[in-house]
Image: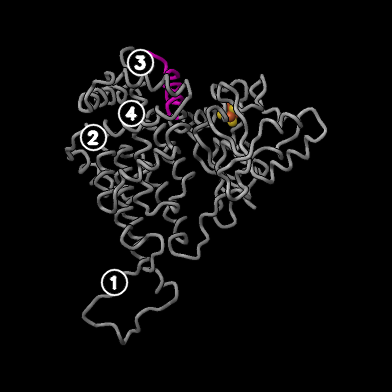
Amino acid sequence: MTASAPRYMARFRCIAEACEDTCCAGLTVPISEARWSLLRQRVAGGPDEARVAALITPNPDDTTGSQAGLLGKRADGHCAFLDEAKLCSLQRRHGEAVLPDGCSVFPRVLTRWGTRVEMAGSLACPETARLCLLADDALVLGPVDEAQALRPQLARQVASGDDAWTAHADTVREAMLRLLARREVPFATRLYALGRMALDLGDFYFPGTTAFAEEATGLQPRAEDASPDVESAPTADARLALILRDAGSMDTLESLRGQLAALELPGGPWAGICGAVLRSREAHVGSPRFLSLMRDVRAAYGGADTTPDEAWHLHVTRRAALDSLHGERVQQYFLHHALNHVLRHPFTESQSLLRAVFFLVLRASVVRWVLLGHPAVVALLDSPGTPVATLDAAAVECFQLVAKHVEQAPQFLEFAEGLAGEGPETFARLLILVKGL
Ligand code: SF4
């Protein structure tokens, strides 16, 4: 097995008691039947036997054995096995092998591309968020020690390559990463270009497509059957290559940049979407850190009675002010978030490439909204001499808390599915979101 990872994940080490959060805080932690059984064997006859028996209970909703038990929680929402030093007492005394899969792997996200395992990170961990957002070279990919890619058997299998959708996935993903990294044009233009590319590919490159089948099987029309008056249509392979090439060309990017600048769209809907996403999460999340930030952000946009148009006006004013002070730095946060998103959420798991891009843009929009409502960022705009470290700390907090409490939540994913709509409608809605970034 070969393993690769962006540099920030090769650098990652859990900072345990120095962490401002804890992986298990506020989350329900399941354990598989196999791990639970191993744990029971390891603790048998020892001082932890009774604790394990009392604190892990059968999960009535499990049907496969993969989530057979649920670990108990303390009153503060942390795992019952966390010790005073914010370390896992089970791991300390019985080794990594007894840990539930989620505890062992987090914040690593493993994906198998053929024989290659890739390790990206979840920004729900403050330390990965810091390492990912703040270092210039954080997203440079390179080999990592196999020992760092814990439990590779849990990696999601993406590219089996036996259908056109997954066979071309690596090529398409490379084009996405290259396009996102084109710093010559604003970040919003790059997302627009990504959406445009996905739209253009969408009529022949999708799950279950047969557009490539003739070429793959060598079934081309015989020369004598082809009409001499009709130029043969480009093959799906050729169209794919052409669209990927054009999407990243400077001419295309400049043209899209002009189109985006000329596009007049009301900002109220954008503000309304971001506010609605966060309000719906507040009702389900118990984390004091998240709830406190949400209260501050709401107040920074004028409180509960502000209209989306008023909140939008505040947002664009702050966006321009922050760009003039720390535009490059902010672009780096969002670029790294987007690159990491492409690495950790294989687009092949979506119904379409356009839908995958829509989810990326929606997630980026929500973080942008939170960042420009963070009290430290609002204060910084009135005190331009504030050190950039203050902005960095606020950004880490925003990206981490949104990653942990919003981005993967079932209610958010359901909302995003509904908002995305279908086909060209998805592209129109994506444009509204891109204009807010
Ligand atoms: S959230 Fe990250 S740094 Fe914090 S305890 Fe968990 S793995 Fe360690």
* Residue where numbered disc 1 is placed: 233
Point out residue 168 in the picture as x, y percentages from the top left corner. Answer: 44, 60
Which is more N-terminal, label 2 or label 3?
Answer: 2
Instruction: Name the residue: 51% across, 40% down.
Output: 140
Which percent across, then down, holds residue 152?
63, 48
Viewer-side label of 1, 4: 4
Q: Which residue lies at the image location 53% right of the left edge and 60% below the top edge?
A: 160
Q: Is label 1 in a helix, a strand or a loop? A: loop
Measure how far apart labels 4 and 3 are at the Cα level: 16 Å
Confirm whether residue 153 shows in the render.
yes
Q: State whether residue 105 appears in this view.
A: no
Dot 1 or dot 4, earlier in sequence:
1
Q: Which mark is residue 380?
A: 3
Question: Residue 269: which disc?
Answer: 2
Drawn side of residue 174 relative to residue 52, left or right: left
- In the image, taking residue 36 as reference, residue 317 lies left or right, namely left
> Which comes before the other along the chain, label 2 or label 4?
2
**Label 3 Cα crowd, 10 Å radius (few <14 / some 14-19 / many 20+):** some
Separation (CA) of disc 2 from disc 4: 13 Å
Magenta stretch, main secondary structure class: helix
Question: Which label number is shown at residue 369?
Answer: 4
Mark 3 residue element: helix
Q: In terms of depth relative to the viewer, which is nearer, 273 or 64?
A: 64
Instruction: Name the residue at 47% across, 55% down.
Output: 170
Which comes before the other along the chain, label 3 or label 1? Answer: 1
Estimate the spatial distance between the alpha carbons at disc 3 and disc 1, rounded to whole Å. 57 Å
Which amino acid does the dot numbered 2 rest on? Pro
Instruction: Provide the residue span drawn in magenta.
Output: 384-399
Question: Which numbered marker is on residue 70?
Answer: none
